[in-house]
Image: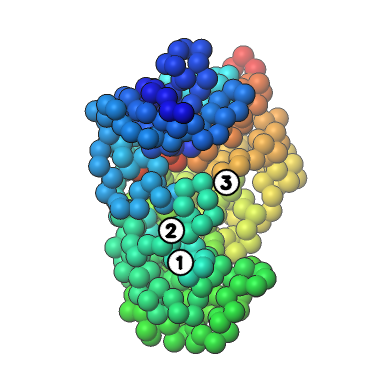
Amino acid sequence: MSEIVNIESLSYGGAGVARLDDKADGKVLFIQQGVPGDRVSIKIEREKKSHAFGSIIEIVEPSPHRVEPECDAFGECGGCQWMNINYETQLEWKSQILKDTIKRIGGVDIADPVIHPATKRLAYRTRVRFHVKDGKWGFFAARSKSVVDIDSCPLLDPVINEAFLDIKSKLSNDLRGPLELQISLSQTDNKVTALFTLEKRGSVPRSSRINWPSLIERVELLKGIEVRRVSTVLVRAGETRIEYMVDGLTMSAEPGVFTQASYSANETLVSVVTDTASLRGTERVWDLFSGVGNLTLPLAKRGSYAAGIEDDRSAVWYARENAAANGIKNVRFSSGRASDKIVSDGAKFLASSTLDMIILDPPRGGDIEAVTALAPLGVERLIYISCAPPTLARDIKFLAESGYEVVGSSVIDIFPQTFHIESVTELIKSERS
């Protein structure tokens, strides 16, 4: 049975939102590929007590914000959700979703975030993970683990697209999956590295017959390759490290160590964080989840001292190397869980000197244990970088209850054409607490 509804808004996750019978108290409907302002005929696919999921049968009246997607795989591939929405509307809804989520989950009202549009709306990704399964090379389909076979993607840097197609053409007869292929662009030489991760059991029966090192000679843009089964390195050949530039620094990392997926967006992110921090040369800063020093080193350049804490030992090794290579000495990196380090070192750090600021940049799930541990330290300023509004809102709620106030926020559009929201939130310790 079909229903005709009006798409009113967008949800975190990408779906358009409508209400059954267009009533304010009607059941909430999540409609994939719905654009605010659309009037559509829909089919309800799944229904629950408080909400339902549907698909569009016909666009009765298109939204003025609807545009033609610049990819033939849009709607089938799960990589993009908003390529059918004009860019200005995408930004408006990312800002609104951030505000609404912090209010709904965190119970905190924030002012309109400052929006930092992407400098590239297409061809921006410099690191990407492909899936290979049943002989298909590409990305997972929307809401599925089946793979949509592609030869290129409009979101990827042209160098990655060219390298991917070349690798695919060379190996498609031998690799049918399941496996993952991560391709990363090294900015300083415009070459790529390829990391193949094989599944633990029953994967890629012909892979042992592949001359992996020869792939570097056969693929023009490929400079290094690594093959892993889960976390065990089976093959490493060529130059596997990638290099990128940020804030006048040359940074390096190895395959599998986290780096931002867009170098141009990373420049914006680091600029927003350093501008928000407004260091004057005397401050001492902790950077939690510091990775390869992407934020720690730019902050150390501007402050008196910076300490980075990171759980990934490989990332810590590269962070120390990056500090040395760039001649930055007023910095220290240590390995361990952020919450454990806060408990073990926080009081000592405060007793020996003034800790002026803590930077948090946790993974998508946030880290409520680290937030719980740092709150009693009473550090005057916190800057929280988040890629997931729901976990940010959860952590802000705890911080607000611990005496912190949100004084500003920004949205950095790292992933145009998708629902993903990167934000920077500044909190200060209230004088009333």
Residue 208, compared with residue 424, is above or below; it is below
Residue that mark 3 sits on: 363
Judge by depth and name the residue closer to the eye, 415 or 263: 415
Q: Identify the element where label 2 is drawn.
A: strand
Q: Position of residue 373 (x, y in %)?
A: 71, 36
Q: Position of residue 427 (x, y in %)?
A: 53, 27
Query: Which residue type carries mark 2?
Result: Val
Horizontal side of 366 relative to 239 (left or right) equals: right
Judge by depth and name the residue closer to the eye, 390 or 290: 390
Q: Quadrant of residue 413?
A: top left
Residue that mark 2 sits on: 148
Residue that mark 1 sits on: 136
- Which circle, 1 or 3, is nearer the viewer? 1
- Which circle, 2 or 3, is nearer the viewer? 2
**Disc with the residue nearer the chain's start (1 vs 3):** 1
**Disc with the residue nearer the chain's start (1 vs 2):** 1
Q: Position of residue 281 (x, y in %)?
A: 45, 41
Residue 431, compared with residue 78, is above or below; it is above
Please say whether residue 97 is visible from this viewpoint. Answer: no
Q: Position of residue 409 (x, y in %)?
A: 44, 29
Residue 31, compared with residue 433, is above or below; it is below
Q: Residue at x 66, y 69 (%)?
A: 200
Query: Which residue type carries mark 1?
Result: Lys
Query: Which residue type carries mark 3?
Result: Pro
Q: Residue at x 70, y 47 (%)?
A: 341
Distance from disc 2 to disc 3, alpha carbons, whole Å, reads 27 Å
Q: Residue at x 37, y 62 (%)?
A: 150
Judge by depth and name the residue closer to the eye, 294 or 181: 181
Q: Quadrant of residue 14?
A: top left
Please say if the residues under marks 1 and 2 sit with CB atoms less than 8 Å apart.
yes
